[in-house]
Image (cartoon, grey):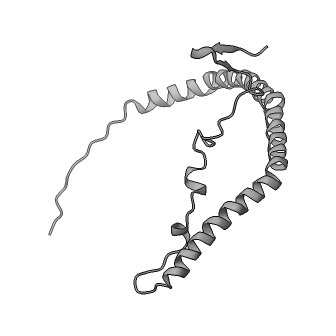
Amino acid sequence: MAQQEELPLGKVESRDPLTKEIDLVERDPKQINQEVVKVDFEDVIAEPEGTHSFDGVWKASNTTFTVSKYWCYRILSGALGVPLALLWGFLFACVSFCHIWGAVPCIKSYLIEIQCCGRCYALCIRTFCDPLFEAVGKICSDVRVALRKERAKD
C-alpha cells in the first residue's frame, strides 16, 4: 500500500508514483529544458542596423514563426507524444531492470573478489618487496651529497 501524508485542508499527498498528481501549469519543475528549448523569433532571425525589411514583413514573419512553431510542436506532441512516452518508459524500465538485476550484483561480486585479490597482493608486497626496499634504504642511508660552488676561470 502506498504511503500517504496528511496535508492541511484535508489534502492527501500520495507517495505512489503511479497515482501522483501532475502539475499542468509548471510542466518543467526541475528545469531540465531551460537552456535547450527556449527559442524565440529574436533568437533565430535578426536584421542588422541598415538592413531592414518592411515593418509589415517583419511583423508577419514574427507572427508566422511563433504560430508555426507553436502548432507544429502541438501537432508533433499530439501525434508522437504518447508513443514516444511509451518507448521512453519501456527504455528506462529496461535500463532500471539491467541496473538492478545485472550491474549492481556484478559490481558487488567484483568488489568481493577484488577484496580477496587485494589481500593476496598486499601479502606478496609485504613478503617480497618490503624487505628489498628496506635493504636498499639502509644501503643508501649513508650516502652524503655535498654541493660546492666553483668559480669559472677566465
Location of residue 40 (image quadrant) = bottom right
Left or right of residue 149, residue 81 in this image: right
80 lies above or below 4: below
Q: Residue at x 19, y 55 (%)?
A: 150
Q: Where in the figure is residue 47, as x and y percent of width and height?
A: 48, 79
Image quadrant where one finds the C terminus: bottom left
Q: Name the quarter where the N terminus is drawn.
A: top right
User: Residue at 25% of width from left, 46% of height from top?
Assistant: 147
Horizontal and vertical percent position of residue 96:
79, 34
Quick one: 135 or 11, which is closer to the camera? 11
Query: Could one spot residue 7 in this view of the protein?
Result: no
Q: Is residue 46 visible?
A: yes
Q: Is residue 108 left or right of residue 29?
A: right
Residue drawn at x 56%, y 28% as measured from the top left: 132
Q: Number of marks in the image? A: 0
Q: Where, by quadrant of the figure, is residue 101 drawn?
A: top right
Residue furthest out toward the left: 154
Q: Position of residue 55 (x, y in %)?
A: 49, 81
Say which of 76 and 132 sits in front. 76
Q: Is residue 42 left or right of residue 143?
A: right
